[in-house]
Every structure is written in C-alpha cells, then in structure tokens.
Image (cartoon, rainbow, N blue to C red):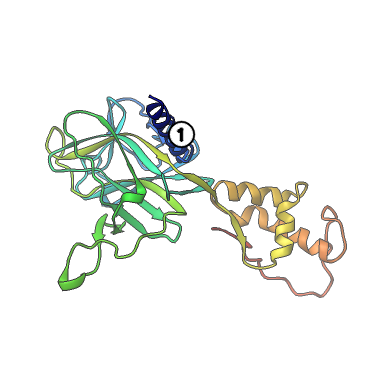
Amino acid sequence: MIKRILAALVGLWLTSLVFAQSSPLFFKEVWTINGAAHAIAPGENVLNNANLELKLYGPSANASDPDKRIWISTPPTNIWTGMTTTPFAATLRDKENYVDLTGTAKVRWITRASGFHAVHPVVKLADGNYYVGEHSDANTSGFLESEFMFATQRWMKLDIERVVTKGTYGPSQDASAWMREPIDLSKVDEVGFADLIPGSGHGAGGYVNVASIEVYGKPVKRRCKSSRNTRETSSALRSRSGRAGSRAKRACRSGGIRPSSWMPLLSRDLRARRMGRSPSTPVQPDSGTSRRSKPRALFSVD
C-alpha cells in the first residue's frame, strides 16, 4: 500500500515538472469575417489579434480574379484554400517578438481537409529562410483539433514564391529532400501553414480549412541595431525626453523603421551634443560651409 502511494506521489511530481516546463502561449488567432464568405482583398484585415500580421504566399495570394484567390469562410470562421489555383501558404508574425520554438514548443489548431489535401506547418526563420514540416492534418470528418511539437519535425526547404519544396539528392540519389541538418528554431519570425496542392473550386473536392491556430513558445524580443555612431544613437534611443529617440523606439516596436520621419531630428540632436549645445537649441549653420548630404538611416530591425 505504501509503495503504491509513493509511486503515485512520484508520478504526480513528474507530471508537475512536465507542466512547469511547458512552453507558454505565444499567440492565438481565430480570424474575423465581415459578411459572407469571400476572397480576401489586398490589405483586408481578417485578424482578431492586433499584435499579429498576416502574410499570404503563392501566386493565388493576390490573384486579380477573386475566384482564383484565397478565401475567408464560415462557419466556423476559417481560411479556405478551395479557390486557389496554385499551392498556398499563410503565416502569422508577431510585431514585437520572434518566437523560440525549441523544447516543448507546439502548435494547436483546428482544421479540416477535403480530397488528398493536408495542412502542413510552415516557419520562417530570422535568417529569412522558409521551411515546411513533415506533420500533416488531413481529417475529412469535420473540424477537429490537433496539436504537435516542433521538436519532433523533419523539415524541407520551401520556395515561398511558388510554395513548393526544395532539396538536394541524398546518398544513392535519395530524393526525399529532407533537411540533412536540424534547423535552428530558437528565433522564428513567422509561423503558419501550407496547402501544397491547388484547390478544386466550390464544393467538396480538394482544399483545407484552418479555423484557428495557437502557437506555444517563448517570446524573443525584436531588437534595433545601429550601423554607425553606436554609442551616440543608443544614448538617443534611451533618452525619454528626446523626440527623435521616442520616435525611433515606436518605430522599432512596430516592426519597421521610418528614417524620413525622425532622422532629421535625431541628426540635429547629435550635432547639437557634439557642439556642446542643448538638443532643444537650434543649430545655426556656419557661413561658407557646404551643404551636407542627406544622413543615412542609423537603424535596422534585427
């Protein structure tokens, strides 16, 4: 009896350790639709999560003909590939963070498929390369929830312009195209899915539906890095009173740098500091000096 109790306690302790090490929810998206099912127009917002950006890939992502484009459908609200005439991929990008998909990181999604179509995971790494995973969900009996861990995946390189797999021959002309070395999932820029077969059109035949997607992983902050004047520009970014520094911070958090809006202010402040003036004091140009060239952008998003 005592042994059974001890075994149960040890089991509970091990279970608690597993849950304690589980990756946190990084984002969840369930889509939003205005009106009836329709092709997603360029620039249309179909996201519920304001922290995310939707990226659509493949020739069918922005086809001029709505009957050859990706659709948003219902019920439940889902991304539907039935009208695509080419392979298609969609990814989600957090505006402020990369995601670490190592360890216990996983995806949980609700999907449905028709015909021989299947939903595959897609990742874009911080180095700009895209990969499609071995896991596939192809259930045809309604919308079902499933999940998988990234650590268990084999990956193929993805040509994101055409949404087709790429690879090299292995030993004895093995044509499987799997990556021979593990990919680094510690800094992932985008996470999503792909349907590698063109859709069949309206009605049952061939397509996938993705009704929701949850990604579990650790956030990794996106950082701005300076290309020159490192110490001075870092000081300007840290300055809470400097207008240029504040604008640069906001641009970095939004995932894009707009040098034209804040660069003149930052350049003026830096010149003022070098000449011993307060940043708020206008800098008078010296007579006879030649006009300076337009300053380059100091920052880029890593």
Residue at image location 45% in from the left, 43% down from the top: 217
Type of the residue with mark 1: Trp
Residue 229 appearing in the image? yes
Q: Secondary structure at mark 1?
A: helix
83 in relation to 247, above or below:
above
Residue pictured at 29% horizontal, 62% vertical = 179
Above or below residue 9? Residue 297 is below
**Number of marks in picture:** 1
Q: Position of residue 112 (x, y in %)?
A: 22, 34
Q: Which residue is mark 1?
A: 13
Residue 266 image offset from top left, x and y in percent: 72, 57
Q: Residue at x 66, y 48 (%)?
A: 247
Whether residue 62 is visible:
no
| Crowd class of label 1 (few under 14; some 14 to 19; many from 20; radius 10 Å) | few
Residue 206 appears left or right of 291: left
Q: Is residue 118 above or below residue 290?
A: above
Tell me the residue at 17%/29% (across/down).
Answer: 141
